[in-house]
Image: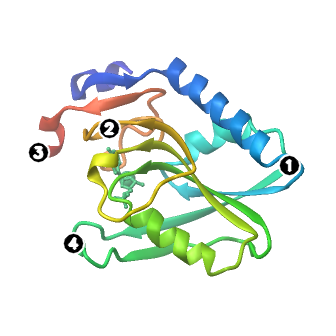
């Protein structure tokens, strides 16, 4: 992680803290879905490391599928326009669906996704997010499973990027403001 040292001001969540919390989430999800089968929908690209670790902590049968979305959150704040870049491979009708996302910020992306997926008539639909920035919320949405609530700081690592960089970091770190203001 030497290469990124000058750009990260602080480690917010260590690799060990993340591992521990992901294990707890997996246990909780396994308990809640006992006797059922799950369809996990990972949101590209940020949720990939979290998805990969989380599914290995879940003991009920599951399949996973992936979606990629692009949100125009800032430019069209009021409408929260979200475009689907990659849709699911298979139908989720009648199935127990859990959306797995890296972070809930304004909430626009997940609020769109939840409505979009609900229209496909799953048996149930819940959200699992690794991080939550509650102070930034613009639309009301809360995840049933939530790894960590964090302050309003721009974070990277464990899937989260700034301009596609930093996704490979095994921890979650705070990006120095000079990195994104230059
Ligand atoms: P929302 O629609 O505003 O909730 O935005 C969710 C998306 O914004 C996430 O999936 C991330 O891609 C991105 N995002 C929000 N906050 C951060 C952050 O602190 N670091 C990296 N990406 C972020
Ligand atoms: Mg991003």
Q: Position of residue 112 (x, y in %)?
A: 46, 72
Q: Position of residue 65 (x, y in %)?
A: 69, 61
Q: Is residue 76 left or right of residue 82?
A: left
Pointer 3 residue Cβ closer than 8 Å to ligand 1: no
Q: Marks 1 and 2: which is nearer the front?
A: 1
Q: Marks 2 and 3: which is nearer the front?
A: 2
**What is the spatial separation of the Cα atoms under label 3 and label 1, in whole angstroms?**
45 Å
Q: Is residue 142 left or right of residue 54?
A: left
Looking at the picture, tell me which residue is in the foreground, 93 or 65: 93
At horizontal 57% and vertical 40% (from top left) the residue drawn is 50
Would you name the residue on which mark 4 appears? 75
Would you name the residue on which mark 3 appears? 181
At horizontal 28% and vertical 31% (from top left) the residue drawn is 174
Dot placed on the residue nearer the N-terminal end, 4 or 1: 1
Dot placed on the residue nearer the N-terminal end, 3 or 1: 1
Looking at the picture, tell me which residue is in the foreground, 167 or 132: 132
Dot placed on the residue nearer the N-terminal end, 2 or 3: 2
Dot placed on the residue nearer the N-terminal end, 1 or 2: 1
């Amino acid at each position: 992680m030497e290469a990124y040292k000058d750009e990260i001001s602080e480690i917010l969540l260590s690799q060990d803290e993340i591992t521990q919390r992901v294990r707890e989430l997996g246990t909780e999800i396994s308990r809640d879905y006992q006797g059922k089968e799950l369809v996990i929908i990972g949101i590209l690209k940020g949720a990939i490391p979290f998805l990969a670790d989380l599914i290995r902590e879940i003991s009920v049968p599951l399949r996973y599928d992936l979606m990629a979305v692009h949100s125009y959150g800032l430019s069209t704040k009021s409408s929260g326009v979200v475009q689907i870049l990659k849709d699911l491979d298979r139908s989720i009708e009648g199935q127990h669906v859990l959306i797995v996302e890296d972070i809930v910020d304004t909430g626009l992306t997940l609020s769109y996704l939840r409505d979009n997926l609900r229209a496909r008539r799953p048996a149930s639909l819940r959200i699992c997010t690794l991080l939550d920035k509650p102070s930034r919320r613009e639309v009301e949405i809360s995840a049933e499973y939530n790894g960590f609530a964090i302050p309003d700081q721009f974070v990277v690592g464990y899937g989260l990027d700034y301009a596609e960089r930093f996704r490979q970091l095994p921890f979650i770190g705070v990006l120095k403001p000079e990195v994104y203001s230059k």
